[in-house]
């Protein structure tokens, strides 16, 4: 990312995100695939003077991805009107985020996980301060990642490991306390790419 993009103020960042044509439109149908589970996550950007992204640390007893860093989100239920509705519902359930406090501005590209989920990342803007109320059954911690972490240095980098007999490459986003990798890191990298082009 350019030096100019690294130094985006909150108003400039909001203007770039609202004005870009690279975010998919909200309310689009969620792509269907009978072999996959549809899910949505909220990518909540807090418009501090130095903007940040809200992330959660999942509790260690969860059946899927225990102890990992993620965005608020989950399965799209039949009662959800859209991916946006699902992402907002899940964010309210997981971290107590008021849906009315979120300005939805679009979607990042669909992300398909190795575990069979088709995830729609929904980007939303929040005015500070954010006072999360995490559900202790699902969320061990709520924290904010500076947007500058996507731009470096050191910035996101790739690692590789053997998983289920196959060599896989995945993104890692540096953080002083938590390991941010896999699907969450890949979506953060997509957001960084969008800002770079914006």
Image (tube, grey):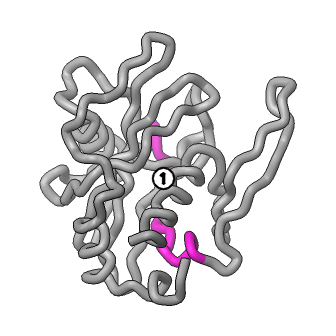
Give the residue at x 66% y 65%. 156
Question: Could you tell me residue 151's position as x and y percent?
Answer: 57, 75
Q: Nearer the viewer, residue 186 or 128?
A: 186
Q: Residue furthest top?
A: 34
Question: Could you tell me residue 74's position as x and y percent?
Answer: 40, 33
Q: Residue furthest left?
A: 100
Q: Which residue is mark 1?
A: 56
Quarter of the figure that contains the N terminus: bottom right
The reply, left or right, for residue 65 in relation to residue 107 is right
Give the residue at x 86% y 25%. 165
Give the residue at x 64% y 62%. 173
Element marked by disc 1: strand
The reply, left or right, for residue 79 in relation to residue 176 is left
Question: Could you tell me residue 18's position as x and y percent?
Answer: 23, 66
Question: Could you tell me residue 180's position as x and y percent?
Answer: 63, 56
Look at the image and say whether residue 149 sits in the magenta stretch: yes
Q: Nearer the viewer, residue 129 or 107?
A: 107
Q: Nearer the viewer, residue 181 or 23?
A: 23
The reply, left or right, for residue 54 in relation to residue 184 is left
Quarter of the figure that contains the C terminus: bottom left
Q: Which residues are magenta?
A: 136-151
Q: Quadrant of residue 26?
A: top left
- Residue 20 vertical position relative to residue 73 in the rendered view, above or below: below
Specify whether residue 76 is in view: yes
Specify whether residue 128 is in view: no
Look at the image and say whether residue 150 sits in the magenta stretch: yes
The reply, left or right, for residue 127 in relation to residue 153 is left
- Residue 169 vertical position relative to residue 158 in the rendered view, above or below: above
């Amino acid at each position: 990312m350019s030096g100019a993009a690294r130094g985006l103020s909150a108003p400039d960042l909001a203007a770039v995100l609202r004005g870009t044509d690279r975010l998919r439109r909200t309310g689009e149908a969620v792509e269907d695939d009978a072999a996959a589970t549809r899910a949505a996550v909220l990518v909540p950007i807090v418009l501090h003077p130095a903007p940040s992204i809200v992330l959660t640390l999942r509790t260690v007893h969860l059946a899927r991805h225990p102890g990992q860093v993620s965005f608020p989100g989950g399965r799209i239920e039949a009662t959800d009107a859209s991916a946006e509705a699902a992402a907002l519902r899940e964010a309210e359930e997981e971290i107590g985020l008021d849906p009315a406090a979120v300005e939805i501005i679009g979607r990042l590209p669909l992300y398909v996980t190795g575990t069979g989920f088709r995830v729609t990342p929904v980007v939303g803007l929040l005015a500070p301060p954010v006072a999360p109320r995490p559900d202790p059954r699902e969320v061990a911690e709520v924290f904010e990642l500076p947007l500058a972490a996507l731009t470096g240095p050191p910035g996101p980098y790739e690692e590789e490991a053997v998983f289920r007999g196959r060599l896989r490459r995945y993104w890692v986003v540096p953080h002083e306390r938590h390991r941010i990798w896999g699907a969450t890191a890949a979506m953060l990298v997509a957001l960084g790419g969008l800002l770079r082009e914006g």
